[in-house]
Image (spheres, helix red, strand yellow):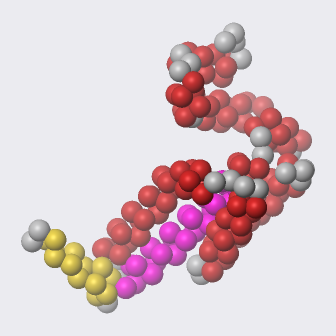
């Protein structure tokens, strides 16, 4: 997109703060819906979006299940699986759904930002905000070391570490 990266950074950070302080599930759900609409409008395939969201969604669902099993008093659903009785509680499921929606809303904002902004433009925007070079160089370097891009390309492990140190590749 042609929106300046500084504007994007400001809006994403503001929206993430709003998402974090939301008291209900409607605001994160709104962010999730808007993010999907934006990503579909720039023709990002659904599979690519879901692949990017897979791990955070898995953790959010795990939190939902754990909170549903361990928080609250009022029983909502009781299951018996292989002789083990599991009881989901209404208060825990409500709290877990709230946390789950915040994770989904936040990760959808971050993924929308990542699909619409290149690393070079992100670095330029961070430099304009006077973020020290060492902070974001390390973050981007570590992210690059573990990204699937290096694993798929078959580059040696030392290549990414050399990039991080600024040495020869």
Q: Quadrant of residue 164?
A: top right
Is residue 107 a member of the stretch shown in magenta?
yes
At 31% from the left and 73% from the top, the residue drawn is 70
Q: In this rendering, does residue 73 appear at all?
A: no
Across the whole image, how many numbered discs are drawn on residues?
A: 0
Picture coordinates of residue 139 (x, y %)?
A: 65, 36
At 56% from the left and 19% from the top, the residue drawn is 155
At 64% from the left and 60% from the top, the residue drawn is 108
Q: Quadrant of residue 66?
A: bottom left
Picture coordinates of residue 33 (x, y %)?
A: 66, 71
Picture coordinates of residue 62 (x, y %)?
A: 39, 63
**Quadrant in the picture for the C terminus:** top right
Principal secondary structure, stretch drawn in magenta: helix
Whether 87 is drawn above or below 36: the answer is: below
Picture coordinates of residue 97 (x, y %)?
A: 48, 75
Q: Quadrant of residue 140?
A: top right
Whether 16 is drawn above or below 68: the answer is: above
Q: Nearer the viewer, residue 18 or 45?
A: 45
Q: In this rendering, does residue 93 appear at all?
A: yes
Residue extending furthest toward the left = 83
Position of 163 with respect to 10 (left or right) is left
Position of 2 with respect to 26 (left or right) is right
Position of 22 with respect to 80 (left or right) is right
Is residue 80 a member of the stretch shown in magenta?
no
In the image, which residues are magenta? 90-112
At 32% from the left and 82% from the top, the residue drawn is 89
Residue extending furthest toward the top = 168
Q: Nearer the viewer, residue 163 or 72?
A: 163
Whether 147 is drawn above or below 116: the answer is: above
Position of 95 with respect to 122 (left or right) is left
């Amino acid at each position: 997109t042609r929106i300046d990266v500084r504007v994007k950074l400001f809006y994403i950070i503001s929206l993430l703060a709003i998402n974090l302080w939301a008291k209900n599930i409607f605001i994160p759900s709104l962010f999730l819906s808007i993010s999907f609409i934006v990503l579909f409008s720039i023709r990002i395939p659904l599979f690519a979006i879901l692949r990017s969201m897979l791990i955070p969604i898995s953790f959010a669902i795990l939190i939902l299940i754990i909170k549903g099993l361990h928080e609250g008093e009022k029983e909502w659903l009781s299951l018996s699986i292989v002789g083990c009785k599991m009881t989901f509680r209404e208060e825990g499921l409500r709290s877990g759904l709230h946390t789950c929606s915040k994770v989904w809303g936040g990760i959808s904002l971050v993924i929308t930002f990542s699909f619409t902004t290149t690393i070079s433009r992100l670095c330029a925007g961070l430099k304009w905000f006077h973020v020290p070079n060492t902070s974001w160089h390390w973050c981007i370097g570590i992210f690059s070391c573990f990204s699937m891009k290096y694993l798929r390309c078959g580059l040696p492990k030392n290549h990414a570490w050399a990039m991080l140190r600024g040495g020869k590749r």
